C-alpha cells in the first residue's frame, strides 16, 4: 500500500526548510505570501522583533472591491501592487521574498512580479 503525505504537510515542510535559510531583518524584512483556496495574503515581517510591518489581503474591502475574483492570477497581481505601495509608503523598499512553500509559479509569481514592478526590490 502506497502512503502519501498530504499536500498541506509537504508545503509546511518546504516552508520550514525555506525559513531555516533566511529571515527578515530591520533593514531587509521578509515578504511572506500565503494563498488559500479562496484568498491570498501578503505580509512584510521583521523577524528580529516578530512584528508585521505591512499587510494586505484579498479579504480587505478596498482590495476586494477592485477584483472580480479573489483567487486568480489577476487578484494576485493586484495584491502585489497593493503590498508594494503600502511598503514604500512606510519606507520599505528592499525585502526578502518568502513564497511560503508554494511553487514559484502562477499566482505566487504574479504577486512577486507585480510587487517588483511597483517598486519593491528582491
Image: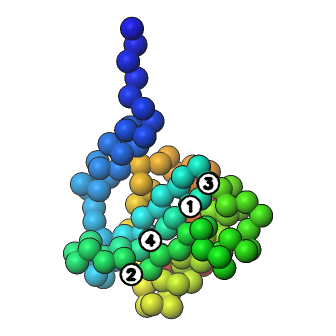
**Real-space Cα separation, disc 3 to disc 1, in angstroms:** 7 Å
Query: Which numbered disc covers residue 40?
Result: 1
User: Which of label 2 and label 3 is nearer to you?
Assistant: 3
The crowding category of the residue bearing disc 1, from other C-alpha atoms within 10 Å (few below 14, some 14 to 19, many at least 20), is: many
Of helix, strand and loop, which one carries label 2? Answer: strand
Find residue 33 and report its horizontal and vertical position in percent. 47, 61
**Dot 4 alpha-carbon crowd within 10 angstroms: few under 14, some 14 to 19, many 20 or more:** many
In percent of width and height, residue 40 lies at: 56, 61
Which numbered disc flags the more N-terminal residue, 2 or 3? 3
- Mark nearest the camera among 3 and 1 is 3
Res 31 visible:
yes
Q: How is the image coloured?
A: rainbow
Residue 119 in view here:
no
Mark 2 and mark 4 lie on one chain; the one further toward the N terminus is: 4
Pointer 3 residue: 38
Q: Is residue 10 rendered to the left or right of residue 110?
A: left
- Horizontal side of 112 relative to 44 (left or right) equals right
* Circle nearer the N terminus (2, 1): 1
Q: Could you tell me which secondary element the residue under label 3 belongs to?
A: loop
Q: CA distance from mark 1 to mark 4?
A: 10 Å
Q: Nearer the viewer, residue 66 or 93?
A: 66
The secondary structure type at the circle numbered 4 is strand
Q: Are marks 2 and 3 in contact (CB under 8 Å)?
A: no
Asked where in the image residue 38 lies, by quadrant, the reply is bottom right
Q: Nearer the viewer, mark 4 or mark 3?
A: 3
**Residue 50 image point, x, y percent:** 26, 74
Measure the alpha-carbon separation of dots 2 and 1: 17 Å
Report the residue at 59% width, 59% height from top.
Answer: 39
Q: Label 4, label 3: how many angstroms apart (C-alpha)?
A: 17 Å
Amino acid at each position: 500500500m502506497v502512503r502519501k503525505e498530504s499536500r498541506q504537510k509537504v508545503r509546511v515542510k518546504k516552508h520550514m526548510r525555506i525559513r531555516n535559510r533566511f529571515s527578515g531583518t530591520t533593514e531587509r524584512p521578509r515578504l511572506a505570501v500565503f494563498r488559500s483556496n479562496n484568498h491570498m495574503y501578503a505580509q512584510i515581517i521583521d523577524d528580529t522583533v516578530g512584528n508585521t510591518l505591512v499587510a494586505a489581503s484579498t479579504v480587505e474591502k478596498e482590495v476586494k472591491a477592485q477584483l472580480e475574483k479573489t483567487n486568480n492570477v489577476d487578484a494576485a497581481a493586484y495584491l502585489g501592487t497593493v503590498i508594494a505601495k503600502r511598503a514604500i509608503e512606510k519606507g520599505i523598499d528592499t525585502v526578502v521574498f518568502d513564497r511560503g512553500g508554494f511553487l514559484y509559479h502562477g499566482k505566487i509569481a504574479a504577486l512577486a512580479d507585480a510587487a517588483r514592478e511597483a517598486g519593491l526590490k528582491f
